[in-house]
Amino acid sequence: MGYGRTRAGTWAGFQAPRGECVDVDAGPGGAGGAGVMRLATEPDRREQGQGSPGQGAQRKEPETRPRAFSGIQSSGRLHIGNYLGAMRPQVALQKTHDAFYAVVDYHALTSVHDASELRRLTREAALDYLAVGLDPEQSTLFRQSDVPLHTDLCWVLATVTPLSWCVHLPTFKDKKKDQAGDVNLGLLSYPVLQAADIIMYKAVAVPVGKDQVPHIEFAREVVRRFNSIYGETFPEPQAVLGSAPLVLGIDGTRKMSKSLKNHIEIFASREELCARVGTMVTDTEKVRRGDPGHPGRCNVFSLHRHFRPESAGAAQGAGGGAEGGPGELAADLAEISASCTEGKLGCVECKRRLAGVIDAHLAPLRERRAELATRPGRVDEILAACAARATRVAAATMDEVRAKTGLGRITYGVAGGGAGGR
Ligand code: TYM
């Protein structure tokens, strides 16, 4: 069976799970296009992490679910742009998909050249993933370099990828500016490795933020090129965007990013969090407290919205709302919008309330992370077991790729032993 597109948003070999995914394109504010879907629902904090990240990495093979893949670079502390744009949708998708999520340290190596720093950041990112609700009973969470077959496939894909595709990719142009003193070859082949990550698992869904959509489009082109030369082998993956595909930084204008230093860390202390929120730029037309505000144009209001469960509106309509419950949070949001518009709510107070809402959301995640950090051996075990499973799937793909391309057949070993390993 081929994996070509059969009609908009429907792919042979991919059944959208009912209720969880999908719109055909990105919808309002999203990056439209054939390769993009919208995630319909995301969990609020009550649903997250119901699995027990600390327990048993032994997992059932969920062969019947469609595959998802995504990755996060271990090049710095993760921020709420990563969380809202990618990690929260990824947690949601693990219920319906056979999800593979990697801390992509080969990618991070294009910018981090200090061994102990890279090792530390990789471990931190794995802890972050577990703390936000990634359940190793349901998903395969691994360190990319524990499955070196990714670089094997990357090389094969590099031989069918025209150089011009890489050179003209806007993300490469941005990287060249960001790290002008270190424009290494890895930066150029970065999207090829990303394509290898995804298609190694024949993933059809790739939950990411909007900035990654060009890379997913790139992966689709690479798949088409490979399949046209060697025969139908890989499905074309689609980006899956959550409800916050592009989170702006505290400057209110540019994408939140650690390199722009306009970020708020997910696992900042309560004090740091309040201080960062306190410096956020608000509606520039609201100069004095009594001036009417424009919530629709204010990044602070947009974060107020993103930190409330999507079900809030519905719950309010149904009369729901225990203290701090969805109904109350939705009512609170409506009240903020109205009193800002009427000039009754000042920006300082609005930010104070935002810090409180974010803190209430993140506090249980912080606790879970602190608890996990006391059991480093357990985290190592999870990563090692997941790397073994990822290697089994990757080896099957590479057998097929090696046979189709004329490369030699080999026996694959399992690397790794946890991010703490040497
Ligand atoms: P990275 O590490 O830069 O970001 C990880 C994820 O976080 C999302 N993200 C955001 N979403 C919304 N608003 C923001 N301000 C924001 N900042 C970051 C990103 O879109 C991403 O989903 N190339 C990838 C890593 C990667 C990968 C892959 C992703 C490697 N292989 C395969 C998917 C599939 C990257 O650098 O992400």
Image (cartoon, rainbow, N blue to C red):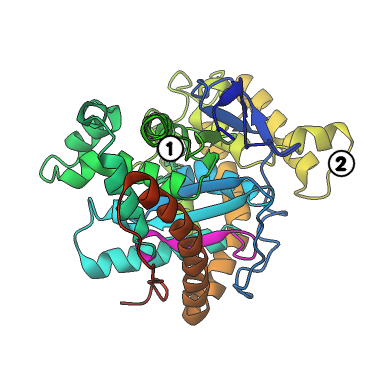
Q: Is residue 379 left or right of residue 191?
A: right
**Magenta stretch?**
134-146
Q: Quadrant of residue 39?
A: top right
Where is residue 153 drawn, in percent x and y?
34, 50
Report the residue at 48% width, 81% height from top.
Answer: 377
| Closest to the observer, 333 or 16 | 16
Residue 418 visible to the viewer = yes
Report how far apart the C-alphas of labels 1 and 2 lie in the structure.
32 Å
Residue that numbered label 2 is attached to: 320
> Percent from the top left, x then y, of residue 398?
40, 54
Q: Quadrant of residue 230?
A: top left
In the image, residue 56 lies in the stretch drawn in magenta: no
Residue 185 left/right relative to 224? left
- Residue type at mark 1 is Met
Q: Position of residue 148 (x, y in %)?
A: 34, 61
Label 2 is placed on what type of residue? Gly
Quadrant assignment for the C terminus: bottom left
The vertical placement of 169 against 113, above or below, is: above
Residue drawn at (23%, 25%), measured in percent from left and top? 168
Mark 1: which secondary structure?
Answer: loop
Q: Could you tell which of marks 1 and 2 lies nearer the N-terminus?
A: 1
Q: Nearer the viewer, mark 1 or mark 2?
A: 2
Q: Are marks 1 and 2 in contact (CB under 8 Å)?
A: no
Of the four image quadrants, the one with ligand 1 is top left
Specify whether tag 1 is near ligand 1 (CB below 8 Å): no
Residue 259, visible in the rendered structure = no
Name the disc covering residue 280, or none. Answer: 1
Front residue (pair 25, 370): 25
Q: Is residue 206 left or right of residue 58?
A: left
Q: Residue furthest right?
A: 319
For the point 45% across and 18% down, which residue is it? 285
